[in-house]
Image (cartoon, helix red, strand yellow):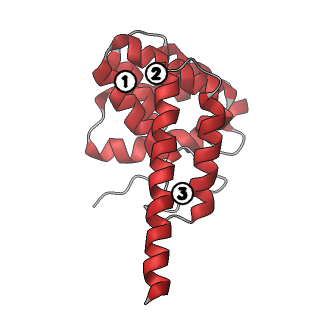
C-alpha cells in the first residue's frame, strides 16, 4: 500500500526546479528509472516526470530527445511511457517532438511504434467514452489539421488519423446514447 506521491499531486512542490543547477541530471535520473519500470513505476513515474519537468518544459524535452534519437526500442518506448500523463493538448502543442518520437519508433519496429502510439493516445484520449462531446470534436478537428501537415501514410499521419477515428466513433456513440436517453 506504499504510495510514493499524493494522489492529488503536487501543486507547487517543484516550482522553480528547472532553474536549479543540475536540473538535467535530475530529469535524466527519473528518465533512466523508466527502463527498470515495474507496474508501480509505470503508474507513478509519468506523474513524477510531469511535475519535475514543470509540464514538459523545453529542457525536459531535450532530455527525452536523447532517447528518442537513440534508435533503441526500450528507450523510445520509455519516453512515451513518461508522457502518458501529459495533458491532451501536449500532442498538439509539441507536434514536432511527437512526430519525431513516432517516426523514430516506426523506424525501429512496428511493435515499438504500436507501444509508443498507445501511450501517446492515452494522453490524447483522456477520460472515458462518455467524455463531453466538445472534447471529442476538438480532438477530431485538431487531429485533422495536424494530419494535413504530414505525408499520407507516414507514422505521424497514421497516429493522428487514428485519433480522428477514435473521436468520430466517440461522437457517434455519444449521439446514439443521448438519442436513446431522450427517446425514453
- Mark 2: few/some/many CA within 10 Å (<14, 14-19, 20+): many
Instruction: Return the residue at label 1.
Output: 113
Q: Is residue 47 visible?
A: no
| Foreground of the two, 64 or 146 | 146
Residue pictured at 37% horizontal, 57% vertical: 3
Mark sitting on residue 155: 2
Q: Are marks 3 and 1 in contact (CB under 8 Å)?
A: no
* Element at label 2: helix
Label 3 vs label 1, nearer the camera: 1
Going from the N terminus, do you reach mark 3 or mark 1 first?
3
| Side of 127 where 91 appears, left or right | right
Q: Which quadrant of the rendered structure holds the C terminus?
A: bottom left
Position of residue 159 measured from the top left corner of the image (x, y, whole percent): 47, 31
| Side of 21 where 129 appears, left or right | left
* Element at label 3: loop
Q: Are marks 3 and 2 in contact (CB under 8 Å)?
A: no
| Side of 158 where 25 appears, left or right | right
Mark sitting on residue 9: 3
Q: Are marks 1 and 2 in contact (CB under 8 Å)?
A: yes
For the residues labelled 1 and 2, the Cα–Cα distance comes to: 8 Å
| Foreground of the two, 137 or 184 | 184
Residue pictured at 54% horizontal, 18% vertical: 100
Q: Which quadrant of the rendered structure holds the N terminus?
A: bottom left
Picture quadrant of residue 150: top right
Q: Is residue 100 above or below residue 27?
A: above
Position of residue 51 measured from the top left corner of the image (x, y, whole percent): 58, 44
Label 1 vs label 2, nearer the camera: 2
Going from the N terminus, do you reach mark 1 or mark 2 first?
1
Position of residue 134 measured from the top left corner of the image (x, y, whole percent): 63, 61
Q: Is residue 109 above or below residue 49?
A: above
Going from the N terminus, do you reach mark 3 or mark 2 first?
3
Amino acid at each position: 500500500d506504499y504510495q510514493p506521491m499524493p494522489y492529488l499531486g503536487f501543486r507547487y512542490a517543484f516550482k522553480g526546479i528547472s532553474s536549479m543547477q543540475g536540473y538535467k541530471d535530475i530529469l535524466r535520473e527519473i528518465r533512466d528509472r523508466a527502463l527498470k519500470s515495474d507496474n508501480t513505476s509505470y503508474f507513478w513515474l509519468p506523474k513524477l516526470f510531469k511535475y519535475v519537468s514543470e509540464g514538459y518544459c523545453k529542457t525536459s524535452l531535450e532530455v527525452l530527445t536523447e532517447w528518442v534519437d537513440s534508435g533503441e526500442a526500450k528507450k523510445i518506448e520509455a519516453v512515451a511511457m513518461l508522457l502518458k500523463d501529459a495533458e491532451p493538448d501536449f500532442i498538439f502543442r509539441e507536434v514536432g517532438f511527437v512526430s519525431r518520437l513516432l517516426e523514430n519508433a516506426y523506424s525501429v519496429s512496428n511493435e515499438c511504434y504500436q507501444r509508443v502510439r498507445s501511450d501517446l493516445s492515452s494522453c490524447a484520449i483522456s477520460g472515458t467514452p462518455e467524455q463531453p462531446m466538445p472534447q471529442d470534436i476538438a480532438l477530431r478537428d485538431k487531429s485533422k489539421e495536424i494530419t494535413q501537415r504530414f505525408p499520407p501514410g507516414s507514422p505521424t499521419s497514421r497516429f493522428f488519423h487514428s485519433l480522428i477515428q477514435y473521436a468520430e466513433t466517440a461522437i457517434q456513440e455519444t449521439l446514439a446514447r443521448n438519442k436513446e436517453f431522450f427517446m425514453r
